[in-house]
Amino acid sequence: MSARAREIGVIAVAGAWWLVLGIVFLYNRGDDVGRLPALAASFIASLARGPVWGLTGLLASVGGASLAGLIGLAWYGLGGALARPIPRLRDRPPHEQRIAEVATLTLLGAAAWSLIWFLLGTVYLYRAPVAVVALLAGVALAATSLVRDRVKPGALVRAAGSAALFLVVTTQALALIAALAPPTAKDTVLYHFALPKAYLAAGGGIEVPYNIAGYYPLGVELHAVWAMLLGAPLGARVGEAAAGATLFLFAPLLVMVVYGWARERGVDRAGAVAAALMVAWVPTAYDVAASAYVDLALAAYTAMAVRAFARWWTTLDGRHLVWITVGIGGALSIKLSAAFVILPLALLALLRSLKGSGPGTAVIAGSAIGALGTGVALAAPWYVRNWIRTGSPLFPFYLGIWPAQAPGWDLERSQLYETLFSLYGNTQSAFDYLLAPVRLAVAAQPDQPSFYDGVLGIAVAFALPLIAWASWTRRLDVELRLATLVSACLFVFWLFSSQQLRYLLPALPGLAVASAAAAGALGGARGRALRGLLVAAAALGVPVTLAWFLTLDPARVVLGGEGRADFLRRGLDYYPYYEVVNRELPPTAKVWLINMRRDSYHLERPYFSDFIFEDYTLTRYVRTATRIEEIRDRVRADGITHLLVRHDILLDYGRSPIVDERRPREENVAKLALLADFFTEGTRLLKGDQKFWLIELPARPG
């Protein structure tokens, strides 16, 4: 067979594989891509119905975005200042790798500022003047760095234009617009923004009762604290927009790391762009960036650590150990799950020591493991704080292994939480695990735990055979084979933990760079064709992203044409009840939120609510009571005056947590009747519909 025929055969097989994946993927996208025409028509109609922009709202969005940009500049300034004294750490790389250098210095600065804000919180210095001084110091450091590097104003203008084009091409401009809008995503109103709001009210890093997320490492959320502090003097809406835009910054930083990593490995510009788009065009990556979630920050620090480890493996250059430390420290200050990357890197460090001989082998392994350990030490303040507060550094997880306690949490709820994580995905047999990459590509759906709660797209599944072939034939260099191996380990860990798609994002950068390098290794027409298919595979995520953006429809509220309250009424079906609570209830009222997503961010009155299992306390009260007064006495003892409940679930026999299948049906029916009486007997319904009730409880007798 001639070389020409082989080229045609390879391209034909790859094209057929792409076509199969694409057809099945689009077949399962009826709920978003299938609705694009209707969503586009609705979006255009909304623009025609009311004003598109308003000065007050537009200024708030511009102010928030500007503050976020200044915070990003402060990250870069501190990162450059920290790197400068370290020998050779700021050696000027080739021009094509400057993008990665800017991203890594900015991530270094973000990790350092996070630690600073942690310390400021311990001494209750969350104050607007402190935030302003910190910003001025960071911007001054950035200006000093730019002057030292002799960056001309014209270059800055061109860089700004390139950045704007970059955001548009990668669809991250849509994510930025959504991030500037008032928050509606569940975890954001539960803790990503709710905890910073509580910290600002207290002036420091307090324990927020019953919000167990406050015991997570919150390295990224502290940047939201900084942004809210800066925006507060200009209005709450400015601070809110600034917080969303600041957390969004990790999305372009991640893509910059991927692009620079690919160029460092010898991939041409087109190939590096393909690698970047494989990450940027993942619909769930858009959703994370738009929702002020933290998973892209985790992916960026993980990519930094893996890239530096691979560089150290081949060169044994000690300066790369610094970036391993920063990557591990930054990742662990975001999520405990970042520990999954430490194990494969530690084992690989030991393996690298075996490649040498003599007394220096122990030093080789020890240096890398020391870098990993130093990274753990950088994130340790979060875990030490938990240890002091609860008795376990791992709280709220693994209470069966390491007992601990805090209000609103116990061993039973910890076990329920771990069970909840196991509901994501539906792999049951060895065959299911084998097919998991393909199922992820074509069947994943948002807001459906059994289908991974997200959308990945087909690019990774399309590239896997190419990566496997390039690794087997040694077309990938050692560093990219290591990155692929670590990504595979992260995928295996993910398969046997919680199969939420956004938790898999840290595995994507290494696979994206390896995919682009594998396509480039073929060279000629085959390489260009495969690279084009990679981009086309990633591009199938763009209409999904566009559909999600149009469903949220945040453009008018960001431009000021739609009011904040109007936008929240569209996005949160319970928000009208929050308006009644905030406007009509006295400041002394205390509201019990039951199955209301525990959204404390949009609430301006004292409240009580269980974490995650929001009917846990109510269920215990009802199951152990025989009379209404027994429940009411316990509620009064907690100071609760009002209930805001989602009654359609609580009173439905088939879905209610009150129902205990171990009991006879008659007993369960009686308990549901008791709950209904608790809601209705002697109470006053302030607002209600088929889903929610806002109830005023009777006053204590006498």
Image (tube, rainbow, N blue to C red):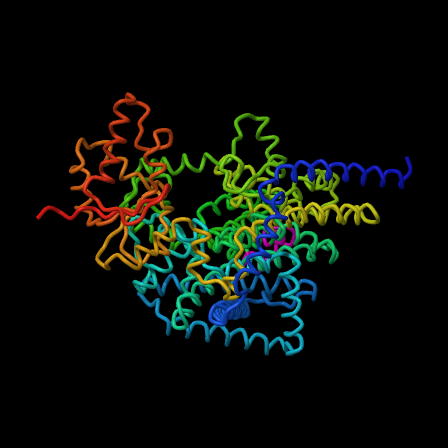
* Main secondary structure along the magenta-highlighted residues: helix
Number of dots carrying numbers: 0
Q: Does residue 691 sit above or below 251 in this rendering?
A: above
Question: Most extreme residue toward the right, as rendered?
Answer: 2
User: Is residue 74 visible to us here?
Assistant: no
* Left or right for 337, reference 124: right
* Left or right for 63, reference 14: left
Quick one: quadrant of the N terminus? top right
User: Is residue 426 visible to us here?
Assistant: yes
Quadrant in the rendering for residue 132: bottom left
Quadrant in the rendering for residue 526: top right
Coordinates of residue 618 in the picture (x, y in percent): 27, 39
Coordinates of residue 605 in the picture (x, y in percent): 28, 57
Q: Does residue 439 sit above or below 342 in this rendering?
A: above
Q: Which residues are magenta?
A: 308-323
Q: Does residue 266 sit above or below 654 in this rendering?
A: below
Coordinates of residue 233 in the picture (x, y in percent): 39, 72
Coordinates of residue 417 in the picture (x, y in percent): 38, 38
Which residue appears at 23% of the width and 48% of the height? Answer: 696
* Left or right for 498, reference 199: right
Which residue appears at 79% of the width and 49% of the height? Answer: 528
Question: Most extreme residue toward the left, as rendered?
Answer: 702
Q: Is residue 572 magenta?
A: no
Query: Which of 109 and 313 lies nearest the eye of the viewer?
Result: 109
Quadrant in the rendering for residue 21: top right
Which residue appears at 73% of the width and 37% of the height? Answer: 17
Question: Most extreme residue toward the front, as rendered?
Answer: 49
Query: Which of 627 and 526 lies nearest the eye of the viewer?
Result: 627
Question: Most extreme residue toward the top, as rendered?
Answer: 664
